[in-house]
Image (cartoon, helix red, strand yellow):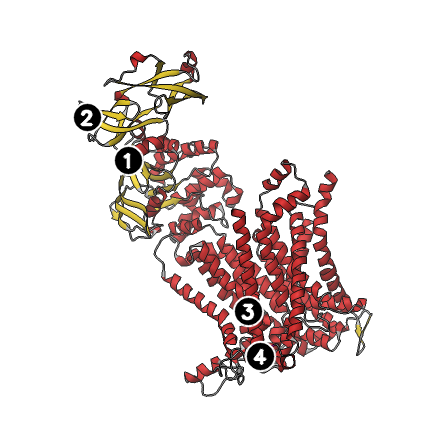
Amino acid sequence: MKNWKNIQPYLLVAPQTLVFFLFLVIPIAAILMVSFWEFTGYSMSPAFTWDNYAAIFSSPVYLATYINTFKFVAIVWLITLAIAYPIAYFLAFHVTSLRWQIVLFLICTIPFLTSNIIRMISWIPFLGREGVLNQTLMALGVTNQPIEMFLFSDFAVVLAMVHLYSLFMIAPIFNSMMRIDRALVAAAEDAGASGWQIQKEIILPLAVPGIAIGSIFIVTLVMGEFATVRLMSGGQSSSVGYLIRTQIGSLQYPMAAANAVILLLVTLLLVFGILRAVDIRKEL
Amino acid sequence: MNIGTKINSVGKTNAVCDLGLTAQGVSLRSVSKKYGSFVAVENLNLDIPAGDYCCLLGPSGCGKTTTLRMIAGHEDVTSGDVLIGDRHVNNLPPAKRDTAMMFQNYALFPHKTVWQNVDFGLKMRKIPQSDRRTRVGEMLELIGLSHLAERKPVQLSGGQQQRVALARALVTRPKVLLLDEPLSALDETLRLRMRGELRKIQKQFGMTFIQVTHGVDEAFALSDQIVVMNHGHIEQVATPAEVFRTPASQFVAKFMGDQNIFTGKVINCIADTNSDLIELDVKGIGSLFCRGYGAVIGNEAACSIRADLVELEPYSAATSIPSTKQNHISVRITAVELTGYVTRVSLMAEKTGQELLYKVRTDDWHNSSLQEGQLIILRWSADDCIFLAH
Amino acid sequence: MSKKRPLSFYLLAAFFGLFVLFLYGPFSAIFLLSLQGPEGQLTFPMRGFSFYWLGEVFQQQRVGDFVSAFQRSFLLGLLVMAITVALSVLAGMAFRSKFWGSNLIFYLTISSLIVPSILVSLGIGIVFSLLGIDNQWYSSALAGHLTWTLPFAFLIMVGVFNRFNPSYEEASRDLGANDSQTFWQILLPLIAPSLIGVGLFGFTLSYDEFTRTSLISGENNTLPLEIFGMTTNVTTPALYALGTLTTAFSFLLIGVAVAAFQLLSHRQEG
């Protein structure tokens, strides 16, 4: 009986852990291995060479792609944070009935349960050459010919990513803010804190774990992006994810794997950086 | 860990002057609070003198916390005026009212240390750094937690958290301290000790304390003045002794507990030297005599007698005739409960089935030969029986 | 909390309104444009009104094989949902007690969210090709989807069990039920409403998944991949019609899940 109790948790957790071992740990190990293999023009063959990595670091085109990816991460992070903080604050502190909080939060959530691809496509009528945005600008006399840059540009890529991922920032911040005892705000008011000081001294510090979790989501989602970059830039912009996709298309597995390893290392570096700065354990 | 000894050991005999604390009174003039159609507090008039320890006592939902929060400025009043000292503060934010609040679960900032928590109010008021350091240091010294200044609230015991909350409230030198159920988060032993310390601090500083509580014992032990509230109204404002001895209404008598209450119709009222002698016709029992004022013949009213002022005597048909001096009813003993110094004897009125209570010294009960199930006479003096007009 | 609403309330409310408009505006646009007449274009203004383009979706020669892609995604979603619910409940139960290595397993699970999706797809693709197994939606793509749905489901279940009062089970054992009776009669009915949520999550995450599937779907595409392929060669409102239909399907699912959740939790409270 005692023995059974001891091994019970291991049996229960085994199936799920097996899934992660087979389909996460081993694949990443395989990527690491293949990143040192050779590419012979039409297939890969086992070897141990740093050539793939050397090729990446010596190519200005590859490096520019990495810079471009970091640029997307930074811009999308900043914008989603700027949107998510006030939205979460509004829901948590200005909406006072729990029922309305749930309803409004669900309204924010529902689009995220639909297809990303469809949500990208749905920007076409707005941003296209004859889209709503251009027609409005021309009607207002801001411009007298349609602006091409709205669709198929970095602008469109960022816009679509913000549209796709802002919930991943809103939900954790909202969660953190909901845990803040309302009496703390009253106590701060009592002590003479202004609205601004309450934000700075009480709400922001206590929402930091949520911001950290949201940031981790945004970083990992945008780092591996290729569909949005491909679709919204019309193939004019690039990202590491898109690069990997293209290399797989031409069967260059070792190069793709080397890029994937670098991408993973950079992502983990950012995530650990965030985790070092913020203790998020209480949120889990 | 005793605040009193700490103060003495520092050698401050007059802490009031040293910490710059002075008291002010609080007045409420026809204050009402409505949430939509729900009336939380209606037409409240109350004067709390400077330096008083005043408890707002009542069951949950009676409006006591709302009243406190209106004084603090965390709730707007719907109508009426709030005065602190002689200042009209209706439109002032909490920080400008010279009040400080101690919250129910203390509301200590979890991400700030003890020092930063106490310092917070001073920092918000932009008091110079050097002054702040002195004042926070003094305050922590006073509550005896200087050695824990760098701890976070979660690392403190309940009693320590309570002291930090008190220090945080006092450090801004408020004229009035508002306490929202400050002892409810503590266990029984700690509650009794912190109760004593609150009272000691209040006396030491001569400050006005207004405390919300639902505990009768707590209100009795702490207050100079008790405000008993029910359904958004004030039922009685009096000293603990007065509330205990002459409850003003059936609600107050019931809420105090350990009172036997009889309802009936006023059939006679005789003016007397100290108070009127009133005769009540109680259904199934007959006439009961009590003392009080404001009886209107023909009205429904009630009288109450404390469970420790009644006496039992052996049953005999002859003694059970009511007189203007003594009330008698026949009762049966249903249960006996020893609670320590006092034994509580549950009784049931023979004719009406009403449950009654008799409290007696345990030693006296043991010397009597009464038994459960026995039919006896419950007797009490009309002078001890309080007339309750409503 | 009944103080007068400050100016900031109205400013933030307006901001919230704009955000909701930002979320739903594009949706409504493609919804409207998919209801155009046969001469409709990809942009406003609307040209006529008909259900022509919604019908067009089902014509294989016009927009590719939508119907069989939908069937595949639907089946895959159900498969992922069933596996996700079962495994996450088991794992959640394991985490009710502290066991040696539990932290390691916890972080392994969470790390599946942190690894960029494209890596999972690439890695599984490489492993399958090294082993000489063909990529299929029901093998490699299923594996990829599980690495995405399981961590979310696991976190939800850990949260559910954290709030679950163990005295219900103790009472059940006290009254003579064995472990399996306790599980089926007491525990499962009590957590059933949460399982609806986990199931909905599992299904929709799989149904809409793109990146993790992108390199390993094999010869037969899942629906999102099929639609992504169409964006380059379909230039008629049929594309929008497809979007409208799949989105309507997602909304329907959410509706069913919410109704089931209400029903189950209502039954629990009597």
Q: On what subunit does the disc labeled 3 rest?
A: C
Q: Are the residues flagged by discs 1 and 3 from a single subunit?
A: no
Look at discs 1 and 3 and give the one toward the viewer. Answer: 3
Please state which amino acid type lies under the numbered disc 4. Answer: Ala
Asked if one can make out residue A195 in the rendered structure from this viewpoint, the answer is yes
For the residues labelled 1 and 4, the Cα–Cα distance comes to 78 Å
Main structural element of the magenta stretch: helix, strand or loop?
helix
Residue C238 — which label? Answer: 4
The residue that mark 1 highlights is B237
Residue C248 — which label? Answer: 3
Please state which amino acid type lies under the numbered disc 2. Answer: Cys
Instruction: Kindly indicate whether the residue at mark 3 contacts the one at mark 4 (C-beta within 8 angstroms).
Output: no
Q: Could you say where residue B32 lies in the image, as x and y percent from the top left?
A: 28, 47
Q: Could you say where residue B213 lies in the image, as x and y percent from the top left?
A: 38, 38
Q: Are the residues flagged by discs 1 and 2 from a single subunit?
A: yes
For the residues labelled 4 and 3, the Cα–Cα distance comes to 15 Å
Disc on the earlier residue, 1 or 2: 1
Q: Are the residues flagged by discs 4 and 3 from a single subunit?
A: yes
Q: Is residue C2 above or below residue A167?
A: above
Q: Could you say where residue C2 lies in the image, as x and y percent from the top left?
A: 36, 53
Disc on the earlier residue, 4 or 3: 4
At numbered mark 3, what does the secondary structure look like: helix, strand or loop? helix
Start and end of the magenta stretch? C53-57
**Res C111 quadrant in image:** bottom right
The residue that mark 2 highlights is B269
At numbered mark 1, what does the secondary structure look like: helix, strand or loop? strand
Q: On what subunit does the disc labeled 4 rest?
A: C
Within 10 Å of the Cα at label 4, are there few (<14), some (14-19), or many (20+) other Cα atoms?
A: many
Query: Which residue is most to the right?
Result: A46
For the residues labelled 1 and 2, the Cα–Cα distance comes to 26 Å
Could you tell me which residue is drawn at 63 percent across and 54 percent down? C154
Within 10 Å of the Cα at label 1, are there few (<14), some (14-19), or many (20+) other Cα atoms?
A: many
